[in-house]
Image: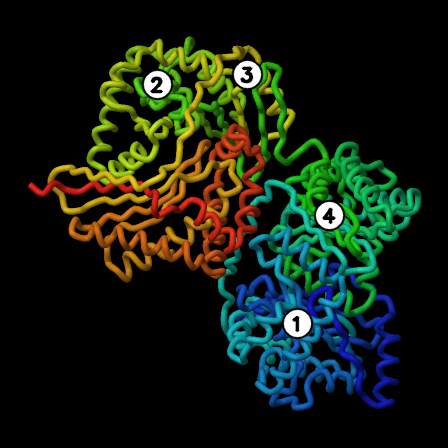
Amino acid sequence: MGAWIEGIDVLSRSIVKVKVLLWLVSLLLLLPLRVGAEGVHRLVLENGLRVVLVEDHSRPVVAYQVWVGSGSADESEGEAGVAHLIEHMIFKPTQAYPQGVARLVEGLGGRVNAFTSYEYTVFHLAVSRSHHLEALRALADAVLHPRFDPSELAKEKEVVLEEISMGEDQPRRKFHKRLWRRAFSVHPYGRPVIGYRKTVSSFKRQDLLSFWRRWYVPDNMVVVAVGDLSSSEVQAEIERLFGPLRGRAPRRVRPREPFQRSPRALLERGASREYYVDLAFHIPDVKSPDFYPLEVLSAVLTSGRSSRLVRRLKEERALVTSVYSYAFLSRDPGLFVVGASPVPGKVREALDGLLEELRLVARKGVDPEELARAKKGLETSFLYDRETVQGEAETLGYFETILGDARKVAEYLKGLKGVTPDEVRGVARRYFRREGLTLGLMVPGGEGPSEEELLRYAARLGEEGGLRRCRLPNGATLLFLRDPSLPLVGITVAFEGGLRYEEEGKAGLTQLLSKVLTRGTGSRTALEIAEEVDALGARLSAFAGRNSFGIEAEGLSRDFSRLLELVADLVMDPAFPLEELDKAKAEQLAALRRQRDDLSWRAFQAFRSFLFRRHPYRLNPLGTEETIEGISREDLLRYWKAYAVPPRMVLAVVGDLEWEEVRKEVQRAFGPFSGKGVPPPSVPKEQRPKAPREKRITYGKGEQAHLVLGFLGASIRDEDRFPLEVLGAVLGRQGGRFFRRLRDEMALGYEVFFFVRCDLDPGYLGAYVATSPEKVAKATEGIKGLLREVLERGVTEREVEEAKRYLIGNYQLGLQGVLSLSSTVALNELYGLGGGFFEIYPRRIEAVTARQVAEVARRYIDLQAYTLVVLSPSSE
């Protein structure tokens, strides 16, 4: 019994007579089996249980296997390891067989064992023909009537815990588990089949019963019988034993592994005397048309001494002592793994060699001779596996359980033989991409590459995939990220500017510009642009924020060229038509009036204008009635020509496209774009207050007061940004201190939160409460009291861990969709963080400690120099 790839045999514990019987049966079991696909008899019982029978009278032995179509991938996080523990418990004594099935079958001269994988649990035995029905009955009783005796369970948990310890003492196995955890961030394939010490230790009898009742049901089970048997007799016995079983398996609900957008690295030091390197690439599930080419690709790389990687890296260059590969294809998308043991002192050369060989097969494919050798090797291995009754039963059980029909076994060799060199090259090009790679390395001691160096190695893999960048001839920056999950493309063009570049007398200019930008060019009217966008089923808009402005578009990837051409026309030749400018002014004035009805917004705007005395962040992004009315078409054109120029442009494309195609189309579309603009304006640096600032404003009749108390904050480029954001989540989320204490415990108001905003220049942080006017003083003291508590006592480790999970989870949720990602990539590049910062941010948040949070709180929160704004209803 044991977890998949981690099996342990049931040892014979019988007398000499049984040992002799085992030896005789072993000889018979090794005789070759000659069964064609036409000999496979498949039926489905009334209760949904599937039965696969094969008669072979060439030797007097029979194999029985019961396949349960559920394994560790059907466990919840808290159930990790329960499927494997059930496998251990099944062969324990039952009421009908108090000695247990293992002892009975071995006493009959047979073999019995079991194993658990991600997708199935298998109980199998092989025995002499003279006792096969008796063995079948014992196997059926064990699977269908387990007792899960608590005392036996307690002992077996100790056995499994020892098995876990044994695995932890084996560096290669330990490394393998961590690599899969790194490759699968949410899918249960990332958990070890055997489970964890914590979960296994916690299991009670009811936990096993719950999982067993859920999945050990007829429509989720397959019984396979192969050997010297009578099909009609065995069928009748299976119907008698399994026919009364009732129940239906629930629908499988598993978390879908997100598309991996950049390479990942795993570095383990000092755990082994040997060097190990694994390259794991995400691939589709077993029902993909790429199934056969992937099987052949693995054989081309490492099957036999003449295979590509064995010959070139081991035999010719002596860079590795061993090398292997396999395609893990299962119900859900899996992994293609290429692994090796580098020769000491040649780790970097081995990495270079592995990556270069993978690049070569993706670029140039395979020659007919090595393809023929690979196919022949797969064919013979497949037949070798079916030489024995056990091997044939296991093959048929797998095809029935995972592929849905044991008779598909006849198609396997045909599928292999039909694979072409172009198909092998095609799957190598599709899946040997750096964005889908998890690169793992285990080295003794402290030597070898760093994790950052591993990521740089991964970045060398081919031309395709990953975040690509280039500088266009006109000075613009192009970034591309391939995302084939849907046939969509997102385009973001961004320029530095926005509110930060506005003058007080022209406040609201970039907001107005963004409204008019998509309403006309030198060659298109507003209506023509709208009709073109609708004809493409696309989305097109302009944006203007506190630090930037630009254009965003999303559509089908097959329409990329047309959509890009439209975006380029808007960038290079905006018309800002007067009639559209008048409409946009009316819209912005209406938005300004709506702002005045939003009391919380008014309080925040008053706070910003009071905190920032010199910086443009003090201005209302919409401007004022006077500034809006005073902005002319010439002002828009002047601003555009000054700041919307190639050297200051970042263009990000994300979607189901290829890099060369994107680069070619962008260079074509934006080739005529030129201009250097003017130097950006000098943005005044804001000084931190040295004493408290308080302002009280009235707004007329109303019920609530709106209170904002805060401080000058950090820039998005500051290292303090990360612990500050964690502090914001500790205090401000719905489960945070402010909500819990000020709202739930003190009942000071319905709307209560703490906020942190980091901008290109230092932003701000603070607290907001909407409360009744008579509670303003109490709310102010409540805020100060909570902040004083943080300054004096810091925050707890638990608060920090919960806050980090909250921030990372919400950040990743915000990256869903090609347009969200293209915008994030473009703005991160524009702001100097680098387009790939979206992958770095979660790691930086994860690294924050409670001590760092307490330190930044003391740096930025000064209760002797706060800024307070209270917006209250008038007393009249």
The amino acid at mark 3 is Ala
Q: Residues within 10 Å of mark 4 (few under 14, many from 20)?
A: many
Write down the quadrant of residue 475 in the picture: top right
Identified at 52% across, 60% down, the residue is 252
Q: Which residue is mark 3?
A: 669
Give residue 516's mark.
2
Mark 2 vs 4, N-terminal side: 4
Mark 3 vs 2, N-terminal side: 2
The amino acid at mark 4 is Leu
Q: Is residue 535 visible?
A: no
| Residue 67, placed above or below residue 766 | below
Disc 3 to disc 2, C-alpha distance? 22 Å
Q: Which residue is mark 1?
A: 66
Q: Nearer the viewer, mark 1 or mark 2?
A: 2
Disc 4 to disc 3, C-alpha distance? 38 Å
Q: Which quarter of the figure is the N terminus placed in?
A: bottom right
Disc 2 to disc 4, C-alpha distance? 50 Å
The amino acid at mark 2 is Val
Q: Which residue is mark 4?
A: 279
Q: Is 515 on the left or on the right of 803, as rendered?
A: left
Depth check, front residue: 146 or 726: 726
The amino acid at mark 1 is Val
| Labelled pair 1, 2 in contact (Cβ < 8 Å) | no
Q: Secondary structure at mark 3?
A: helix
